[in-house]
Structures are given as structure tokens and as C-alpha cells.
Image (tube, rainbow, N blue to C red):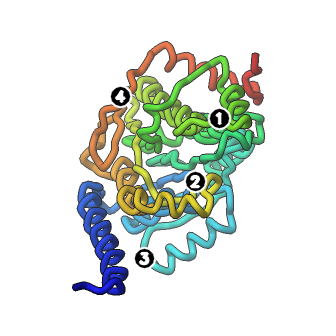
Amino acid sequence: MVSQSVLYVAVPISVVVAISLVRKWRSRNWAKCASNTCLRGKTFLITGASSGIGMETAKALVYRKARVILACRDMDKAKEIVADIRKKQPRGGELIPIHLDLSSLDSIEKFVEVIKAGFNKIDVLINNAGVYAPLKQDLKTKDGFEIHFGVNYLGHFHLTNLLLDHLRRATPSRIVIVSSTLHEKGQINFDDLNLKAEIEEAKRGKSSRHNPGYCNSKLMNYYHMKALTERLGGSGIDVNACCPGFCNTGLFRNTIRWYHYILMAPVCLLYMRSAKQGSETVVYCASDYRIEGVTGRFYRDCSEYDSSHTIDKDVEKKLWEVSEELVKARKPIPIV
């Protein structure tokens, strides 16, 4: 008869081994960017490149000899990342950290002035940076917009528009918008883009399974991709969006508590990708030669993904117009 002490050891080990095998089996379905084409002479601009998926994307592109502009809010961290990448890849492409705070429209404009002064063209713009924060914190950008709307969507909207001439000079060029399949859970309410109603509910202790601020901003990213595709048709600038998957990055640092690590451990072990695994689809959209000339698509696991969200052309047009008005006015839509 097996002793209890042996069971106490054998059962946990068996569980760990089983979970590891299941994770390994699942990870086989997580695609990798197969293209290793040399990118020497091409300039890539990545927002939020000092950590997570943006950092891993930068590493992959530098390995392929690209010049990479790391657009980051935390310059000290960005310089540390540059030093670390250069130490591991001394013969890779060039790394250039430049300050960019997507929560400030003024910072975006100053950043673009630096780009215009130092670079003649941008081959690929990767709109990667993003925030995820509890709605009850009621965080705002420096211009007064709800944080998810202002950073994840509106900041990138303004940045992209300001860099279009640089992208045109590099044609064939690309814009890659990092969205999420959570865009399918989003809604766009033009009467409350700053989510006053949802924030008040969150402050009263009511919350939904999915953060509406984050989901809505990712839906706006999806609409942004579609709108750019139409407006840039025939220009030589390809525009695509992608979902990196559920990844182990610092995105959820403002929402995770110590007990979440215990409760979510099985789910994370089975479903959560590393930042490097998450970056594969971003790198694919940004560099794979096989999709040159392909535009207006959504990708996941390095292949096309059919979104369940049906694009409403009226919403697409209105979102663009409202976004332009907000950038010009420098103030959030009044709440009624």
C-alpha cells in the first residue's frame, strides 16, 4: 500500500507535469513569425517599446537588422532596454529611444517634430502602447480624456495622422495597430466616450467581467484600422490590426492583487503566453514579406482572424470626425 507521504509528493508532481504537458500542447497552436528577412535600411517606430510585447517586438526587429525607434514615456527604462538588447545583439540594427507620452497631445506633437527633424521616412509604424486600469480609479489623460480612450485610441489616432507623410515617403510601408479580440466586447457610445456612467457604477462597486474602457478602446482601434484602410487605399501604405493574445506583460499591473496569482495560476499556466510569444503576430504583421500589399485585415496567431463585430460605416465615419474635433479642441467631449 502506498504511504500517505508518497502520495503527498506524487500527486502535486503529477498535477504539475500534466499542466506542463497541456501547456506545451496548447503552445504548439501559438504561431511564430517564420520570416527572417533582413530589414536593413528600414525604419520601424514602436510605441510602448520599453516593456512587454513592444520590447520583444523591438528585439525581433533589431535581430533582423532594422533601425528601431523606441517611443517610450519612461526614458530611463527605455535606455536600460536599449543597453540590454545591444549587449545580447551587438551586431543587430540601430536602437533609438525617444520620449513620447501618449496621454498628452502636446507630447505627441513634440515627438513628431523630433521625428521630422531626424528621419526622412518611417517604413512601419507599430501602434502598440496601451493601458489597462480599473474604472473606479477614474484616471484621465493630461488633456482630460478617460485614460483608455485617450491613450489606447485617441493618442495613436493623432500620432498616426501626423506621421502619414513619413509613411508615404517609404512606400510600400505599413501601419500595424495592436488591438485585441476583446474589441468584440466593446461598444462606442458617442454620448459618453469618457465612460462617466460606467465609472460611477464602478465606484459604487458594480463591475463587469471585461473592462469596458479597455474593450471600447480596442474596438476603436479596429475602426481606426478600417477607416485608415479606406482613406489610404492605393497609397502604398498597408494598414492591419492584430491581437497578440492573453500575455504575461505589465498591462494588468494596476489590477492584480497577490491573491489573484493563486486564483488564476491554473488559467495562466494553460492560457497565458509570454510577451515574446505574444509579439510573434505583431512582428509578422510588421515584417513578413508575404503580406505586403494586404491591407484592412485583422490577425491573430500569424493568420487572418474573422471578427464577429460588423463594421458600421456611420460609426466609422463619425468616430473619425469626432476624433479630429477632440484633437483640435484639446478637451474631452462634454458629458450631458
Q: Is residue 164 visible?
A: no
Q: Position of residue 115 (x, y in %)?
A: 61, 50
Residue that appears at 52% across and 30% down: 220
Question: Which SS class for mark 3?
Answer: loop
Which residue was labeled with disc 3?
91
Which residue was labeled with disc 2?
252
Residue 77 vs 145, above or below: the answer is below
Residue that appears at 41% across and 21% down: 311
Indicate which disc, 4 or 3, sits on the residue closer to the N terminus. Answer: 3
Which residue was labeled with disc 4?
308
Q: Tell me the kind of residue under disc 1.
A: Lys
Q: Quadrant of the C terminus?
A: top right
Q: Is residue 176 left or right of residue 70?
A: left
Indicate which disc, 2 or 1, sits on the residue closer to the N terminus. Answer: 1
Residue that appears at 70% across and 33% down: 199
Q: Position of residue 117 (x, y in %)?
A: 65, 51
